[in-house]
């Protein structure tokens, strides 16, 4: 069972980077905090430099909130997203950021794989307006092949989000020859369609923009010969999800 791995004060955490005007990680213009550390080892990870929990930069909530305050005018129709890495490896840190964001009247979004001990996540969700849940696959064997971890914590997390009626966007990375088997896609679509709290599904076509980072870290990139999915394959997958009455983008 996954568990938080950072022993820092709740007001201090490790981050990889910050993006001040993001447009793809939640509604509107977003201030995005990319946390350091991830328990997954996804074959297509485009930020492998985020994986090491001991890397990144130690910073405080006060420092982050000061930067958010400087950009608040641009976030009026957007908000703050905490991504990663895996932000739920630092739940106290993220919970405090979101609590302070709500004090400022800002929308909050959590971008997570859901691979977390549920009790650690619950305090974060108190001040979370939207969850962006990345579900890497539905077949348990394929999920493990892609991530090197079990799918069960993610499914448990997804069911809990439905139980509390937490607004959620589901993200699925479509990798030709890996995550695209029809039974895998159909199984995931049926599961997501059963939840009742999912506002939209994002089909994310595989890309190799992060391949150079693997090379810089001296790591083998298993998908070096894999090409992005064709428009036809993307449309096929979109239609499978829409058959479950889901909004797909």
Image (tube, rainbow, N blue to C red):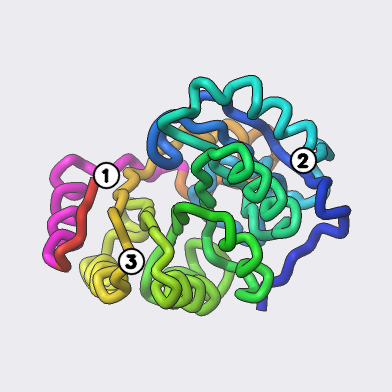
As helix, strand or loop, the secondary structure at mark 3 comes to loop
- Give the Cα distance between marks 1 and 2: 39 Å
Viewer-side label of 1, 2: 2
Label 2 neighbour load within 10 Å: few <14, some 14-19, many 20+:
some
Main secondary structure of the magenta stretch? helix
Question: In this rendering, would 145 be left or right of 173?
Answer: right
Q: Can residue 189 be seen in this view?
A: yes
Name the residue carrying label 1: 229
Q: Quadrant of residue 232?
A: top left
Q: State the residue in front, 241 or 245.
A: 245
Q: Give the range drawn in magenta.
A: 224-243
Name the residue carrying label 3: 197
Viewer-side label of 3, 1: 3
Label 3 neighbour load within 10 Å: few <14, some 14-19, many 20+:
some
Q: Measured from the top left, where is residue 202 in percent x and y?
A: 31, 49
Is residue 216 positioned above or below 84 on the image?
Answer: above
């Amino acid at each position: 069972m996954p568990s938080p791995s950072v022993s820092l004060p709740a007001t201090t955490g490790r981050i990889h980077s910050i993006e001040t005007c993001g447009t793809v990680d939640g509604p509107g213009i977003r201030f995005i905090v990319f946390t350091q550390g991830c328990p997954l080892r996804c074959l297509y990870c485009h930020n492998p430099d985020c994986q090491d929990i001991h890397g990144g930069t130690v910073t405080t909530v006060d420092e982050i909130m000061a930067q958010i305050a400087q950009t608040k005018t641009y976030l009026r129709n957007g908000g703050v997203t905490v991504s990663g890495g895996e932000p739920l490896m630092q739940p106290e840190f993220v919970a405090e950021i979101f609590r302070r964001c709500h004090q400022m009247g800002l929308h909050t979004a959590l971008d997570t794989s859901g691979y977390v001990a549920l009790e650690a996540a619950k305090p974060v969700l108190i001040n979370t307006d939207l969850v962006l849940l990345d579900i890497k696959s539905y077949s348990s064997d394929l999920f493990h092949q892609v991530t090197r971890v079990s799918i069960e914590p993610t499914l448990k997390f997804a069911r809990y989000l439905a139980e509390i009626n937490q607004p959620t966007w589901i993200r699925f990375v479509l990798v030709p020859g890996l995550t695209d088997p029809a039974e895998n896609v159909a199984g995931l679509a049926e599961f997501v369609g059963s939840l009742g709290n999912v506002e939209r599904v994002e089909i994310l076509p595989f890309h190799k923009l992060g391949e150079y980072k693997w090379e810089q870290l001296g790591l083998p990139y298993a998908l070096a010969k894999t090409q992005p999915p064709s428009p036809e394959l993307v449309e096929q997958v979109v239609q499978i999800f829409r058959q479950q009455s889901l909004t797909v983008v």
